[in-house]
């Protein structure tokens, strides 16, 4: 059996797959976060707009899609959002593989930093990004609730040398 994680950039043809993976990965948070996760009400049209505006990748183990992530180029960094790993495949390096993809993508775009935003109510997620080399650069009120807090984490990425290596 092939347990190797393979990450592939994808386009609009994978909207429904990314939507399904995101919904399945975020389902544990339905009713548990205040305000609710934006993923809860997300439609395939929102996913399509995210892909068109920035891009996405899917992680596979063998022939099975097990995770997805979306990215958006900002003027000074690559924003990584909706990192979604199926619960049955967590702890197997899938999220790290997707983040490595994002870091390489940022470097290929000439960007020197990757950023993520995490609810402070999800300390395990904050800890994951810290283990991946991210540092907290900002804490602010959640944009939909004055009582919830969002943590912004950033990681510098090495310059891309144009020869397929970072």
Image (tube, rainbow, N blue to C red):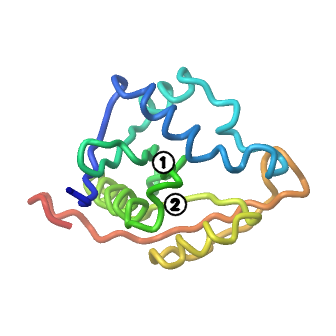
Residue 57 image point, x, y percent: 35, 43
Image disc number at residue 101: none
Decide which of 12, 152 is in the foreground and name it. 12
Which residue shows up at 74% across the image and 66% down it?
A: 120
Q: Nearer the viewer, mark 2 or mark 1?
A: 2
Asked if the residue at tag 1 contacts the one at tag 2, i.e. Cβ–Cβ closer than 8 Å, the answer is: yes
Locate the N terminus and report the quarter of the image it occupies: bottom left
Q: Tell which circle, 2 or 1, labels the residue nearer the N-terminal end.
A: 1
Locate the C terminus and report the quarter of the image it occupies: bottom left
Decide which of 58, 166 is in the foreground and name it. 58
Which residue shows up at 65% across the image and 39% down it?
A: 39
Residue 3 image point, x, y percent: 26, 60
- The crowd level at tag 2 (other Cα within 10 Å; few <14, some 14-19, many 20+) is many
Which residue shows up at 45% across the image and 61% down it?
A: 114
Residue 147 is left or right of residue 26, and the answer is: right
Residue 88 image point, x, y percent: 48, 55
Which residue shows up at 56% across the image and 76% down it?
A: 135
Question: In the picture shown, does residue 13 fall above or below 19?
Answer: above
Image disc number at residue 74: 1
- Label 2, label 1: how many angstroms apart (C-alpha)? 10 Å
- The crowd level at tag 1 (other Cα within 10 Å; few <14, some 14-19, many 20+) is few
Looking at the image, the residue that sits furthest to the front is 1
Image disc number at residue 115: 2
Decide which of 48, 61 is in the foreground and name it. 61
**Element type at marker 1?**
loop
To which quarter of the image does residue 2 belong? Answer: bottom left
């Amino acid at each position: 059996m092939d347990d190797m994680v393979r990450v592939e950039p994808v386009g609009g043809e994978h909207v429904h797959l990314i939507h399904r993976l995101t919904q399945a990965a975020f389902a544990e948070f339905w009713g548990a976060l205040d305000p609710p996760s934006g993923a809860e009400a997300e439609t395939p049209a929102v996913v399509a707009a995210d892909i068109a505006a920035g891009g996405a990748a899917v992680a596979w183990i063998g022939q099975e899609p097990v995770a997805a992530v979306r990215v958006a180029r900002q003027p000074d960094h690559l924003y990584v959002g909706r990192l979604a790993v199926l619960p049955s495949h967590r702890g197997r390096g899938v999220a790290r593989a997707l983040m490595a993809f994002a870091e390489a993508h940022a470097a290929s775009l000439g960007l020197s930093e990757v950023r993520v935003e995490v609810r402070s109510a999800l300390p395990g997620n904050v800890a994951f990004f810290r283990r991946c080399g991210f540092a907290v650069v900002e804490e602010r009120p959640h944009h939909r609730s004055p009582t919830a807090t969002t943590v912004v984490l950033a990681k510098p990425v090495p310059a891309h040398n144009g020869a397929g290596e970072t």
